[in-house]
Amino acid sequence: MNPFHAKGLSLVLATDAASRAVMRWSGKDKKHEADHDAVEAMRVSLDSMPMAMRVLIGEGEKDQAPMLFAGERLGTGKTGDPELDLVVDPLECTTNFSRGLHDSMSVLLAAPSGSIPAIPGTYMTQILLPPSPAADYFASRPAADSIDPGIKNILGIVSKHNGINVSDMLVVVQDRPRHAEIIHGARSAGAGVALIESGSISAAAEILLRPNGRWTLLYGTYGAPEGLILAYMARVTGGYFAGRISPHHPLFAEQARELGLDDQTLPASEWIVADGCLCLTGIHGNTFLRGVMRQGQGLVTESLLWTADGVEKIVHENGVQMQRADAVF
């Protein structure tokens, strides 16, 4: 059995715990309080597990415990060398959650120590496609060739290799002023645009898990930590991802230079160089994952565990595993 499948069955308890802990703040416009409770629940859960883990990308500063901060050691084996590096977002889509809207999740990516690069906490220009001939074409080319041509040329390439008209495509773009040129370019080429307020991870899951669905690709500049999550999702599903750090401040530009990441466009296999596991637990539901549900006096969660073996759906009730099955979408 894939060793990361077994680890994932344990690690998903941390995203389950964060999801249940945060629900008392649902729709109450209390982002700080919600973040705090989600982070603390995840931290306590991870710290009780018999593994040696290090937070590579987290939340909070070292002097603001109990926030999860970069470099923090977790697990009962934390005195030794870290076995796993973690990218965590205990409450993804915080604004949506605080407004009572859909798409919030608890997210945890784990991979062998040293297999995920440390990155600045800034933006990343990204492209994501589902498994398809166009994805195969881009994978055969330098990664920059999938980002630099601009949205009109990208749509033309996808049209040619996937055999679909540009007018039948729908491009996922975050609704931000920085994307005005992309939005105009896609629509002027004849494609539709799906404007999302936030939730690039949810959008990526929709694209990758439903390759014949309504969304054709994701393009634009999103959070760099989320980009690592998308890279892993593409890696294990056979989709295509490429990303380039796009600093929004000179401090982050300098960090990117120090890390050797300035002007580097990398495919998924270079952002995540080894297999691992990804845990997503729904908080407020979306089209592929139910949110936290009340059942009697308890809370039921639904999670997706992504590994190289595939995607599995897991249901917990009050932290106890109740169901497991291959995910069907």
Image (cartoon, helix red, strand yellow):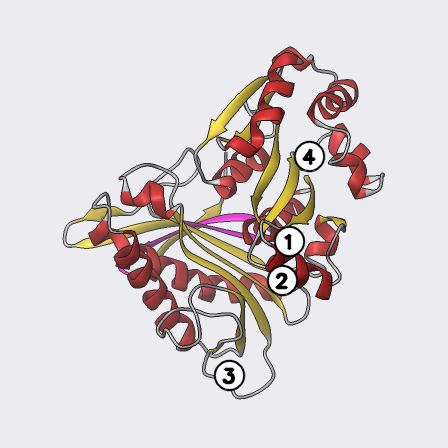
Q: Main secondary structure of the magenta part?
A: strand
Closer to the chain start, of discs 3 and 4, is 3
* The disc label shown at residue 308, or none: 1
Q: Nearer the viewer, mark 1 or mark 2?
A: 1
Q: Which residue is mark 2?
A: 2
- Is 314 covered by the magenta stretch? yes
* Labels 2 & 3 near each other (Cβ < 8 A): no
Q: Nearer the viewer, mark 3 or mark 4?
A: 3
- Of residue 157 and residue 246, the one placed in the foreground of this image is 246
* Whole-percent x, y for residue 91 in the image: 38, 53
Q: Secondary structure at mark 3?
A: loop
Q: Secondary structure at mark 2?
A: loop
* Image quarter of the N terminus: bottom right
The amino acid at mark 4 is Pro
Q: Give the answer, above or below, for where 9 lies relative to 325.
A: below
Q: CA distance from mark 1 to mark 4?
A: 15 Å
Which residue shows up at 31% across the image and 37% down it? 101
The amino acid at mark 3 is Lys
Q: Nearer the viewer, mark 2 or mark 3?
A: 3
- Left or right position of 108 against 135: left
Q: From where the camera sits, is residue 319 visible? A: no
The amino acid at mark 2 is Asn
* Whole-percent x, y for residue 7 in the image: 53, 67
* Labels 1 & 2 near each other (Cβ < 8 A): yes
* The disc label shown at residue 131, or none: 4
Closer to the chain start, of discs 4 and 2, is 2
* The disc label shown at residue 78, or none: 3
